[in-house]
């Protein structure tokens, strides 16, 4: 007992901060040694007191305890590099690059190629996605190696020769190794090498192949005056949607439209549905058998989709015949094309003063237009005949609008106009407006009064575009229309107001027409020399091809698409007129807020339709890939 007390006193002096359970354990060990010493068993050494060192479970070396109970040399035998350097299917790691455009395959599936700079962060992210162990695709091989999870801590590029077709990375990885009943984490640095292999992208494939189309879409708008304002709207819609342009193999320009070529029928139909949201049109599909194989019961079939746009454009003044259908109460009257989308929005050009505005507006669908015949809806005056007027007086027709006008006029000197959906004012309202020609200021005092739907858009002093029917010279056909096409209650107005424009400067008029370009071309006379004639012909061909390329560039097709001109088009003034009309349309777009707003609405609708169609195609898959080889029974 005295020996035990002495031992305990010494232990407390050497271990004053040791916890109670540790003290009890050491006291128990010392007591056991003393008991064995008293019994004569003195073979026990002080090695039992070294509890901070253990032998390695693999090689037996004395080590500090760790979760794996293994030494550093044994832990290093776990090879993480064999897991990380393993590509899909156990092969080498490969990244594909297009030889022609030098773009890299982003996802490894050959569908999305992107231009990447060497040793850039985007290049690093693309390479790391190609490693199956890091992207979660090599889980089975990792579990077989005893690795439960891999964590990327750091990555950097290792310099290689530019022409070596190799890319090397140094990765710092942390691996969780499953050592039952616990998990051990180790950290290693691994070198990874990628092989760069050539693979042609889809865009370069479409550019290199020729005459492999299976469907053609013919877009046409045939107008009497040869205007292209409707086609310009379609060009803007195509230019703002890159998703729809990627399936076009080539485009061929025509005098009254365009021809688009596609690799399959479903892509052409998808594009036709896209165009039908921007303008009303009639769509017909036909097919022609190019060749057949009766032994294998297959045939090579070419499909043609004809899209005929309604030959009516925004701001056109049209005549609705008495027998026309689908326009409600607007039969036998002059109507104004308010705007175009999937349908034509029409408004009465000369509404009755006390009528309801809802009865003065209607929608004309493409089916009703083509069923009723083109003679039921004829252009009375095109938009190029618009004249600038200045508003002198505004009197609202509706009693509620007049009360609101009086209240706003009494509170302040300005009347509240429509300035968006949040202004609390409807966009259109009937009003009796007094106007005068802008060109008559300073020369005469002639004024005109008319009833228009622009009551909430116009105020005194504004400039408005309209048709001057009082001084217009009509053709014999127009005079016959005035006598026979209108109802007995309809009275032709002196002025038809169309829309409000910005500014009062006549130089900025969007509809100013000129024939300078034609006159300049008319002044050039043919030379008698054959060589000069040939040079002049070559210059004309180059000028025409350049104009056609500009038309395709406006649609966003660029120089990568195959652009061809129409060999049957020999009209030299057509391209100059088309370019002039395009410039006029751009000026009109800058001055007209309503037109810009309508284009934005159409763009949002087209983007939504494109997303829905893309989701539908991704769900169904590419069912029409082999449609060019249809069996004769199905054909």
Image: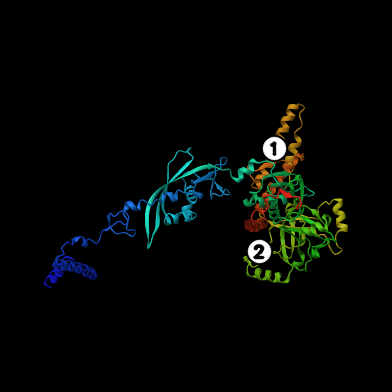
At 77% from the left and 31% from the top, the residue drawn is: 526
Residue 176 at x, y percent in the picture: 40, 57
- Which of discs 1 and 2 lies nearer the camera? The answer is 1
Q: Nearer the viewer, residue 113 or 364?
A: 113
Residue 358 at x, y percent in the picture: 74, 67
Q: Nearer the viewer, residue 240 or 489?
A: 240
Q: Which residue is mark 2?
A: 418
Q: Circle 1 — which element?
A: helix
Q: Name which quarter of the figure residue 458 lies in.
A: bottom right
Q: Circle 2 — which element?
A: loop
- Of the numbered discs in the image, which one, if any, rests on residue 543? 1
Task: Please say if the residues under marks 1 and 2 sit with CB atoms less than 8 Å apart.
Answer: no
Q: Indicate the quadrant containing the N terminus: top left, top right, bottom left or bottom right.
A: bottom left
Q: Count up the numbered dots.
A: 2
Q: Name which quarter of the figure residue 143 lies in.
A: bottom left
Residue 503 at x, y percent in the picture: 66, 54
Does 520 sit left or right of 200 as displayed?
Answer: right
Task: Determine the residue located farthest toward the left in the rendered image.
Answer: 2
Gap between marks 1 and 2 measured at Cα: 46 Å
Label 1 packing within 10 angstroms: few (<14), some (14-19), many (20+): some
């Amino acid at each position: 007992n005295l020996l035990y007390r002495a031992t305990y006193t010494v232990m407390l002096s050497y271990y004053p901060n040791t916890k109670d359970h540790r003290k009890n354990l050491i006291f128990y060990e010392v007591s056991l040694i003393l008991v064995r010493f008293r019994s004569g068993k003195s073979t026990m050494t002080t090695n039992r007191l070294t509890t901070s060192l253990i032998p390695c479970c693999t090689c037996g070396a004395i080590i500090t305890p760790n979760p794996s109970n293994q030494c550093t040399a044994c832990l290093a035998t776990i090879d993480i590099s064999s897991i990380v350097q393993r590509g899909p299917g156990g092969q080498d790691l490969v990244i594909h690059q297009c030889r022609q455009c030098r773009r890299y395959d982003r996802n490894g599936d050959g569908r999305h190629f992107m231009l990447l700079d060497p040793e850039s962060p985007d290049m690093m992210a693309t390479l790391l996605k190609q490693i199956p162990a890091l992207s979660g695709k090599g889980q089975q091989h990792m579990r077989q190696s005893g690795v439960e999870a891999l964590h990327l801590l750091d990555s950097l590029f290792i310099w290689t020769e530019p022409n070596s077709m190799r890319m090397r990375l140094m990765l710092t990885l942390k691996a969780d190794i499953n050592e039952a009943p616990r998990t051990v984490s180790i950290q290693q640095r691994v070198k990874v090498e990628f092989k760069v292999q050539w693979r042609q992208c889809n865009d370069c494939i479409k550019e290199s192949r020729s005459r492999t189309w299976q469907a053609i879409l013919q877009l046409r708008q045939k107008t009497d005056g040869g205007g292209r304002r409707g086609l310009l709207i379609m060009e803007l819609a195509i230019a703002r949607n890159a998703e729809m342009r990627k399936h076009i193999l080539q485009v061929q320009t025509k005098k009254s439209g365009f021809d688009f070529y596609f690799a399959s029928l479903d892509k052409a139909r998808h594009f036709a549905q896209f165009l039908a949201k921007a303008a009303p049109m009639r769509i017909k599909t036909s097919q022609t058998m190019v060749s057949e194989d009766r032994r294998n019961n297959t045939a090579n079939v070419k499909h043609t989709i004809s899209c005929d746009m309604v030959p009516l454009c925004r701001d056109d003044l049209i005549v609705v015949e008495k027998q026309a259908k689908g326009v409600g109460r607007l039969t036998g009257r002059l109507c104004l094309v308010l705007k175009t989308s999937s349908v034509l929005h029409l408004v009465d050009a000369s509404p009755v003063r006390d009528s309801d505005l809802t009865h003065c507006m209607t929608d004309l669908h493409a089916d009703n237009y083509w069923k009723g015949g083109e003679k039921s809806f004829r252009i009375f005056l095109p938009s190029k005949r618009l004249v600038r007027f200045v508003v002198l007086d505004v009197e609202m027709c509706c009693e509620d609008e007049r009360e609101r006008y009086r209240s706003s006029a009494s509170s302040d000197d300005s009347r509240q106009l429509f300035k968006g959906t949040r202004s609390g004012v409807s966009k259109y309202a009937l009003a009796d407006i007094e106007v005068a020609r802008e060109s008559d200021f300073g020369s005469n005092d002639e004024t005109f009064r008319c009833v228009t739907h622009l009551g909430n858009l116009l105020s005194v002093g504004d400039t408005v575009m309209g048709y001057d029917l009082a001084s217009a010279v009509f053709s014999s056909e127009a005079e016959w229309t005035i006598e026979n096409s209108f109802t007995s209650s309809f009275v032709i107005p002196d002025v038809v107001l169309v829309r409000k424009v910005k500014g009062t400067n006549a130089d900025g008029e969007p509809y100013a027409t000129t024939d300078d370009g034609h006159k300049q071309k008319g002044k050039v006379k043919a030379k008698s020399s054959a060589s000069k004639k040939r040079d002049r012909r070559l210059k004309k061909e180059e000028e025409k091809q350049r104009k056609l390329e500009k038309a395709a560039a406006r649609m966003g097709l660029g120089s990568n698409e195959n652009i061809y001109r129409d060999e049957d088009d020999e009209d030299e003034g057509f391209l100059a007129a088309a370019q002039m009309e395009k410039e006029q349309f751009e000026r009109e777009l800058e001055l007209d807020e309503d037109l810009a707003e309508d284009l934005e609405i159409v763009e949002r609708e087209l983007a939504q339709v494109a997303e829905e169609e893309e989701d539908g195609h991704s769900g169904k898959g590419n069912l029409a890939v082999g449609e060019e080889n249809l069996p004769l029974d199905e054909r």
